[in-house]
Every structure is written in structure tokens, then in C-alpha cells.
Image (spheres, rainbow, N blue to C red):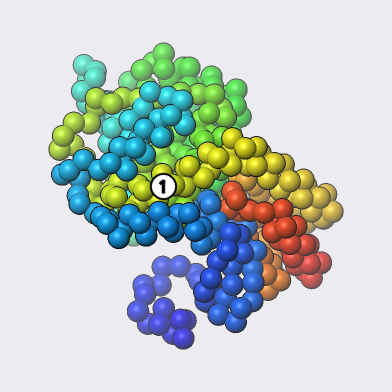
Amino acid sequence: MVEKLDKEYVLQTYTRNYVNFKKGINATLFDENEKDYIDFTSGIGVVSVGHGNKKVANKIFEQVSNISHISNLYAIEPQAKLGQKIAQLSGMDVATFFANSGAEANEGAIKIARKYGETKFDSKKYKVITLEHSFHGRTITTVKATGQESMHSANFAPYPEGFSFNNKIDDIYNSIDSETVAVMIELVQGEGGVQPLDKEAVQKLAKYLKEKDILLIIDEVQTGAFRTGEFLASNLYEIQPDIITMAKGLGGGVPIGAVITTHKDILTAGDHGSTFGGNYLCTSAALEVLDILDEEKNSGTLDETIIYFQDKLNEIYQNNRDLFTHSVGLGLMRGLRVKDAQTLASIISEGFNEGVLVLKAGKNTLRMLPPLTISKKEIDEGFKRLENALSKIK
Ligand SMILES: Cc1ncc(COP(=O)(O)O)c(C=O)c1O
């Protein structure tokens, strides 16, 4: 039924699996036949506090029963409080613009950088350098910022000017010219293969850019909201970027994007805006999500979960070195490099049959982004099912 409707009425831009999920409890999903699945994907890093989270549901119900949306023509209390919470948790002197998605947050970051480059110097600076295997979004600009040639299809050309990407951090220095305004990177490349960047190399780059008055934009759309174990991966890397973008896990399933910057005076009234961005619904949900995750972190539960997950992952990695070549990632953003793409596809589909949901990243990385609230029992069960799947494909 859902397959027929989907194929007839929804534009077919995704390769979909036609399971019909009906219910979710934390990291466990149930389909229409009541088969259960352990979710190691959290909707690609979104459902950070688990499926069906009652605290978030109650908060949303309470909020939308009263006001869900007024528009940004008026002050919005939960928006202001969320901005304050983000500043507190980041430990930085920042203010936030609220958008609706990761790509939109990155668009906002690029606009701040472009205006900085237009207004702060004698001659215009507008170029943005990114890294190969990065992923920054699907809008015309963010897809061009994405460092994957295969995503710059001629079908959507022409793209905006001023974007180039380098193979590795050390190459960025030579690519900088007098028109470079910003460098935009992910600290753990998510879609590109769960690849963390080297901490010292990032710190060296951050210092160099600061000296040259070139902005550092950190795309934390996937790494933000405690995914790597700290509120921001920037906290883990001990850097103070000029601009940070967030989305995914921030809303726990409610669409929200955030452009967080220390340069509070660059955008002024009329420069940027969004109808839905930061409305009562999404910001009250995100406030609740951050309260829950902050508590998980402070109580030590999140760190315990990360260690437990990592240990189980390591077991499966060591037991299956004939299939896996590397174990990669940070926090609850983990990956296992699979010997080839065909084997990876079989693991994902056999895992699905066994009742565990896992993701692909890059060409050959098995990616796991479980809810940050996943229980030990769910971790045990998920890896047991994954092990069963592996034994079937051998
Ligand atoms: C690092 C990063 N940036 C940007 C995006 C785009 O986010 P969205 O799909 O919400 O536009 C993604 C999505 O996967 C991402 O992982």
C-alpha cells in the first residue's frame, strides 16, 4: 500500500526500502507486522534522544496547544532561550540564526562569510575552500561547496562561483589567495566515510586562519548536539571557529538548523531570514532535546554508552577482519570500512532482514549513528543481529 502510493505520488529521488514503520521506542522500531528493528541510524543522526521520546512529545504538545508559530516579526521566547543554551553549552561568546535544515544553515554561514569578505577589507574576498569527501548539503550553493566532483552534475549547472576543494588539510594553505574569505570543514566527515580529521592539523589551521583574518566555518550538522561525546566536535578539538552550523540531532526529529557565530554584527536587519526558522514549535523541542542530552552528559551516562558501544563495535570488528579493514569515527558516530562496496550492500540488506538498521557512508563504510540514549540491551541486541547478518553473507 505505502509502496504504491509512494511510487505514484512522491517524486522518486530516493532509493527506498518499503518497510512501513509504525512505532518507535528509543532505539527500537516496529513495522506494520510488529517485527522489531534495532535502529543504529537514528534517521541519519537526527533522533538523538530516541524514537517516541515522551519528554519531547509532551513539550511539543504543550507548546503547539498554545502557540506553534507567530513569525520572526516578533520576539520568540524559546528561540531566545535556545540561543542562550547553545552559547552556554558551546562555551563560546556566540549568537545564533535559526534555519530549518543543515543545508540552509550552511547557506547562512556562507552568507555571513561573504558579507564579511565584502565589508571588512579594502578589496572583496568571497572564495570558500572546502575539503574533498565533504558533504555540505543539496541546495545549488551547498552542493557546489561539497567536495565531491560527482555531485556537481551538469544537470544543475551553472553553480555559484568561488568554491574549490582540497584533498587534505595541508593542501589548503597553498590554495588560499587574496580573495579567500573562509575555509569550511567537517571535523568528522560523515557522509564521506566517518573520517575524523587530525586534531593537531585542525588546530594549526585554525590558528593560521585567525592570523590571516580568514573565517573558519565548522559544519557540525552531523557532529553537533553531543554526537561525538561533547556538545560540539569543536569542543573536542579545542578550537574556537568563527561560524558553526548545526541541524540533525538538535531537534531530535523536528526540523531545525542553526548558524552560530562569534561575529554577531555582520548580518543586520534584512540581510537574512526565514519564515519557519526558529519558530515556537522547533525551538521548544530543541530546548527539551538539549536539556535531556545535557543531563545524559553530566550524569556520565553518555560517556558510558559511548564506551559500551565502542567495545561491542570493536568485538565485531576483531571477529570479522576478513570483512572489515578499519574501524573509524568518534563518540556515537562510528564506521567500519568494508573490504568492498558489494559486501557492504549485502551487510546492510542482510542486517535489515535480521532486524538491525545500519547505514552506508562514502563508497565502502558501514556507518552507525544510534540514538545517544540507546540502552545497553539495545546495543547488545543490535550487534547480535549484525553478527548474524555477517555470518549469513560469509
Ligand atoms: C555535514 C553535513 N552538512 C550538511 C548536511 C545537509 O543537511 P540537510 O540534509 O539537513 O540539509 C548534512 C546531511 O547529511 C551533513 O551531514
| 145 to the left or right of 267 | right
Relative to the observer, which residue lies in front, 318 or 285?
285
* Residue 150 x, y percent position in the rendering: 46, 53
Against 85, is 42 above or below? below
Residue 317 shows in this picture: no
Few, some or many residues within 10 Å of mark 1 (<14, 14–19, 20+): many
Horizontal relation, residue 297 to residue 284: left or right: right
Observer-nearest of 368 and 154: 368
Residue located 51% across and 55% down the image: 47
Residue at x-position 45% and y-position 34%: 218
Quadrant for the C terminus, please: bottom right
In the displayed image of the protein, which residue is found farthest to the top?
A: 211
Residue at 74%, 50% in the rendered image: 313
> Residue at (60%, 50%) from the top-left corner?
373
Q: Which amino acid does label 1 sit on?
A: Ala
Give SS at disc 1.
helix
